[in-house]
Image (spheres, helix red, strand yellow):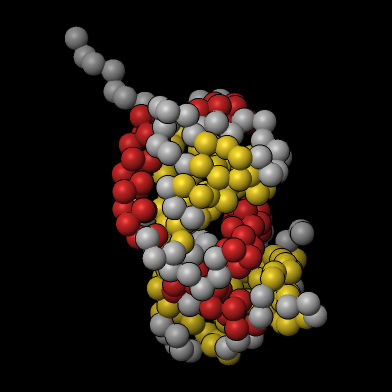
Amino acid sequence: MPVKNDAEKRWVELDVVFPGTPEQLWHAMATGPGISAWFTTTTVDAQEGGAIAFDFGGGAVSRGTITAWQPPARLCYEEREWKSDAPPVATEITIRARSGDTCVVRMVHSLFTTEDTWDDELEGFEAGWPGFFEVLRAYLQHFAGQKAAAFRASGVALGTHHDAWREVSLALGVSGPNVGEHRTTPVDAPTLTGTVERVQQGAKTCEVMLRLDHPAPGIAEIGTYSWGGKARTTLSVYFYGDGASEAAAEAEPQWRAWMAKRFPESEPESSQT
């Protein structure tokens, strides 16, 4: 959807249908444990005026204030320091029940400015959510309400993000994927085994989502995208169940080391003679 605007603000909006009741969707989209189970580590002070914080790792934390708290139907929060020199961004999430044990979720991101300076960021919000929403959909279908532990490992590759995708998909045994296939990582990578749930390849991103059966039940998203003039690789892993925390604690350092070796964030400095 294009960026919309009026005399006070500019915004983008998404409408998505998810399985589940309003109460299940509220837990998943308005509580710390729920959001952490499909997006990133999040804390929520569950009240109007309370704090909400999204921890993306490496010291990158986006903090906001809850401006509306109406369970299980409506959550609003405002982030004022989400990016240097940017105007405040307000997020509104509404949940509406419909037939067949499904809900329509509307998410609106608004910037309080009449200038188009930040339209790329607004469009980036919109482009970034669909992949996470697919994780949310799989979580609701297969793991709703279970304990969760997650981590993310990322790196930088040479060339375009399509070049990066060819490299990382081969390295992790997910090249040429078809939905329903069972895949496992090669012996020179940490172990992930699961069934292909989703394949998305386009001009901006390439992604494969696996529903994991080893080393623990969960979901893995393997993808590439362009950001800041670089091709980036990313692996997001979500483990569920009573053993989720232990599985994540064991797997996270393995995957961070693998990513740092295979797709280092920066080129090593050349030795001086």
The one of 223 and 142 positioned closer to us in this rendering: 142
Q: Is residue 129 visible?
A: no
Picture quadrant where residue 20 is located: bottom right
Residue 121 drawn at (x, y percent): 59, 56
Picture quadrant where residue 65 is located: bottom left
Q: Is residue 193 visible?
A: yes
User: What residue do we see at 69% from left, 69% from top?
Assistant: 18
Q: List the single residue furthest toward the left.
A: 273
Name the quarter where the C terminus is drawn: top left
Q: List the single residue furthest toward the top.
A: 273
Residue 138 drawn at (x, y percent): 62, 60
Task: Please give left or right for residue 125 compared with residue 191 in the image.
Answer: right
Does 95 appear above or below 139? below
Residue 172 drawn at (x, y percent): 51, 32
Does 234 appear above or below 68? above
Picture quadrant where residue 110 is located: bottom right
User: What residue do we see at 77% from left, 59% from top?
Assistant: 1
